Amino acid sequence: MRSILALVALCLAHGAFAADGAWRIGTGLHYSTGTYGGSIDTTIVSVPLELRYENGPLVLKLTVPYLDVDGATTVIPGVGPVGGRTAIAHSSGIGDSTVSGTYALHYDAASRAGFDLTAKVKLPTGDENAGLGTGSTDASVQIDGYRALERFTAYGSFGYTLFGDSPIVNLDNVFYGYLGLSRPVSATDSLGFEVYLRQEGSPLPLAQRELMGFFNRRFDRTWRGQAYLFKGFADGSPDWGAGASLAYSF
């Protein structure tokens, strides 16, 4: 499944002030369910392990999810329905992992505005025969931007995914993007929302459209957490989902 995008606002806003050589480890619980335009409910539970390293303008991140999928065999986490004969099954195990690198291209301290360039590679660590991955190595590149607007922080991204050769499905390369807005409500807490869109391929993947609301809390200098709820509005997205994450910096 894709990463929790709402954390991007905080990561970018604090990135210019982070100490060199800072590490962060995190995990969470993500739940989603939906019919994906069909008649069978598919429930996906993900427990990701995230490791992040930040040194100056460069941020490197590795995400390895543990997945539990119950429902249609044609639904792949993070991708959506991939066609073919539909059956009902239950599977669990490691999903596809993601390695990403982000470089801060520009940052203006006065306006707290900047642009970053991110490259991501999805590795086929999930068993495609069990519906836990695509069996292909995929790559994405995106430009990220953010700006402070009085007490708000606006952020967004525009990217392109190149799907590799999968043994189970042919996927067209697609554009994707998201826009979000966050606002602090105290010295430690913030609220916000985010809209995520993914282009429809021909014939696959199906389009994704999702709206998410989130709550962030910084417990102290080392611990931070997030809770979120989202709603899907396209056949490539689940009907709804929720989750929480916790991260420790050292």
Image (cartoon, helix red, strand yellow):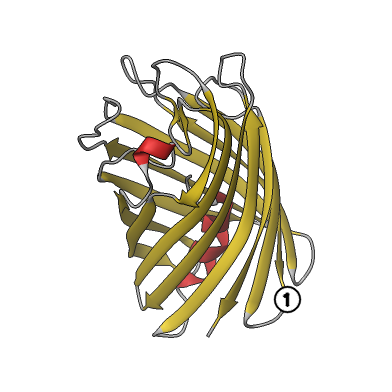
**Which residue sits at x=70%, y=81%?**
220
Q: Quadrant of residue 157?
A: top left
Tell me which amino acid carries mark 1: Phe
Q: Position of residue 24 (x, y in %)?
A: 50, 76
Q: Is residue 66 above or below residue 239?
A: below
**Which residue sits at x=40%, y=75%?**
53
Q: Is residue 70 visible?
A: yes
Q: Position of residue 75 (x, y in %)?
A: 48, 28
Q: Across the whole image, how many numbered discs are drawn on residues?
A: 1
Horizontal arrangement in the rendering, residue 15 relative to residue 230 (left or right) = left
Q: Position of residue 186 (x, y in %)?
A: 79, 67
Horizontal arrangement in the rendering, residue 122 relative to residue 224 (left or right) = left
**Which residue sits at x=40%, y=76%?**
54
Horizontal arrangement in the rendering, residue 220 relative to residue 235 (left or right) = right
> What is the secondary structure assignment of the residue under circle 1?
loop
Q: Is residue 100 above or below residue 140?
A: below
Q: Is residue 89 above or below residue 4?
A: above
- Which residue in the structure is indicated by mark 1? 219
Q: Is residue 140 above or below residue 74?
A: below
Q: Is residue 112 visible?
A: no
Q: Nearer the viewer, residue 166 or 56?
A: 166
Q: Nearer the viewer, residue 56 or 36?
A: 36
Other-residue count near label 1 (Cα within 10 Å), few / some / many at <14 / 14–19 / ≥20: few
Q: Position of residue 196 (x, y in %)?
A: 52, 36
**Which residue sits at x=50%, y=25%?**
236
Q: Residue at the far right: name it.
A: 186
Q: Nearer the viewer, residue 84 or 31?
A: 84
Q: Nearer the viewer, residue 177 or 184?
A: 177
